[in-house]
Amino acid sequence: MTEPPTQDDAAQPVARIAVIGCGWWSQGWHLPHLAANTPSVEIAAIVDPTPNPVSTLASSPLLSLEELSKKYSCPFYNSVADLLADPEVGPTLDGAIVATSHASHYEVGMALLREGIHRRKMAEGIEKEEEGIKKRQRHVHVFHRNLSILMEKPMTTSVNEAKRLWETSAMNYPEGAFIINHTASYRPQTQVARRIIASNQIGKIRHISASMNGPLMWLFDDPKNEAWVLKSSSMSGNGYAYGQLAHVLAWIYNVLGAGATKEDIANPTKVYCTMTHAPNTGADVSLAAVISCSDGITFSLDGTALLPGSQYADPPIGKQIRVDIFGTSGSLMYSGDDKKPETGRLELRTTAHDGKSEFPCAREDGVDDGFYFEDGDPMGTGPGSMKAFLDACRTSSSKFARSLMNHKMKADGDNDLHVVNDSLVGLRTVQIIDAMYRSSMSGMPEVIVN
């Protein structure tokens, strides 16, 4: 049994994290980022169904689970069930990173969410036994170790699965953070844009136009890259839409405040889309879509993998990204080359200032006034999405430690856990992409599965 923490331990919380899926991205990014966050983070476990992970994208052979276990001084498991069943590890986790195949995100995510719900119910049962049964509101007085999730994008490749993850994370288990690893959504510039929309500076949103073009034919026209080009049984299609445009859709819905406000802006109802496909794989590599929304917003989205070059070349060729949001009293525009921050900046124009260009990031302390989108830097402590995830895990760990030292402590005045939930952003992204693929096949507008 683990000894109860001391006051010093509580002041220095250590977040215990499991990494589920040990392929190219976990070995090149997630695990090094977690290791760089020590001593406030401990890699508690790694999980993968195969003892020797492989990747067509890795420049050198990946490490085996046994080698990773030695490198990061943690146990390894072949399934999430085995991880959670281990009494010395499963109940002590503060968070888990899901970096498995897209089609398995639902199964893994639901297992983790059910574990969080189980912990809460166990805590409720103990408290009822000790204090007697009485009504409580939102479980604010119940102390248990929350389990937060950082899930790779897309959230799922099935609308029904995405909807169930959203319902479970947002309604049945609202305590733990549920973050989709859209790194662009966690840039400081994105948060500035979100505040502008939330404060109604451009009025009621009426039109959205977005584009993302990347040098990625090497990825989507190579049959070896099966995860990027082949569709599973739950997918309507696979290629550039899921692989890249998911980032832009997530950025837009994050800026619009999906899941964080009562108003559901740009709730999609119908999509018409045309696509072209790679000659060797059949994956989509170019597309243009028109999205109808329940609030009357017009929304156009396009993109292609046909930009020449490679983001991994020397010098790297960046993706060309543009998002324009127009309202009844202004517009917000963000565009540039994601490898060259100097090529763009967040621009605001309002009728109150006669349409003159303003650059809000220039007025913000600590925010670079340039174009920053995805954060794929393998060095350092990780992107903003990782930092938000670890902050939630550490806060939960600290609060849980304090509750063990003083079990009768009440949550009043101590409810400092800021929960981040991206599940509605994930759902909207999957809904639109699913309808895009169906429309491309039918040649007709397709209704959003809701």
Image: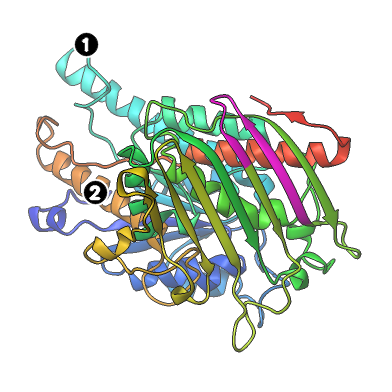
Residue 235 or 346: which is nearer the viewer? 346
Amino acid carrying label 1: it is Ile
Name, please, the residue furthest toward the front: 354
Name, please, the residue furthest toward the right: 279
Q: CA distance from mark 1 to mark 2?
A: 28 Å
At label 1, counting other C-alpha atoms closer than 10 Å, the crowd grade (few under 14, some 14-19, many 20 or more) is few
Give the left or right position of residue 90, taking residue 217 as reference.
left
Q: Identify whether 163 is placed above or below 237.
A: above
User: Measured from the top left, where is residue 430 in percent x and y?
Assistant: 63, 40
Q: Which mark is residue 133?
A: 1
Identify the residue shown where x is 17% and y is 48%: 4
Say which element carries label 2. Answer: helix
- Magenta stretch encompasses residue 130: no
Identify the residue shown where x is 27% and y is 53%: 394
**Residue interval drawn in magenta:** 286-299
At label 2, counting other C-alpha atoms closer than 10 Å, the crowd grade (few under 14, some 14-19, many 20 or more) is many
Amino acid carrying label 2: it is Thr
User: Measured from the top left, where is residue 294 in percent x and y?
Assistant: 58, 24
- Label whose residue precedes the other's in the sequence (1 or 2): 1
Residue 198 or 107: which is nearer the viewer? 198
Give the left or right position of residue 112, taking residue 290 as reference.
left
User: Measured from the top left, where is residue 193 in percent x and y?
Assistant: 38, 51
Say which element carries label 1. Answer: loop
Q: Identify whether 118 is placed above or below 87.
A: above
- Which residue lies under the disc numbered 2? 395
**Mostly what secondary structure, the magenta segment?**
strand
User: Measured from the top left, where is residue 149 in percent x and y?
Assistant: 44, 47
Q: Let me know if residue 323 appears in the view.
A: yes
Res 414 quadrant in image = top left
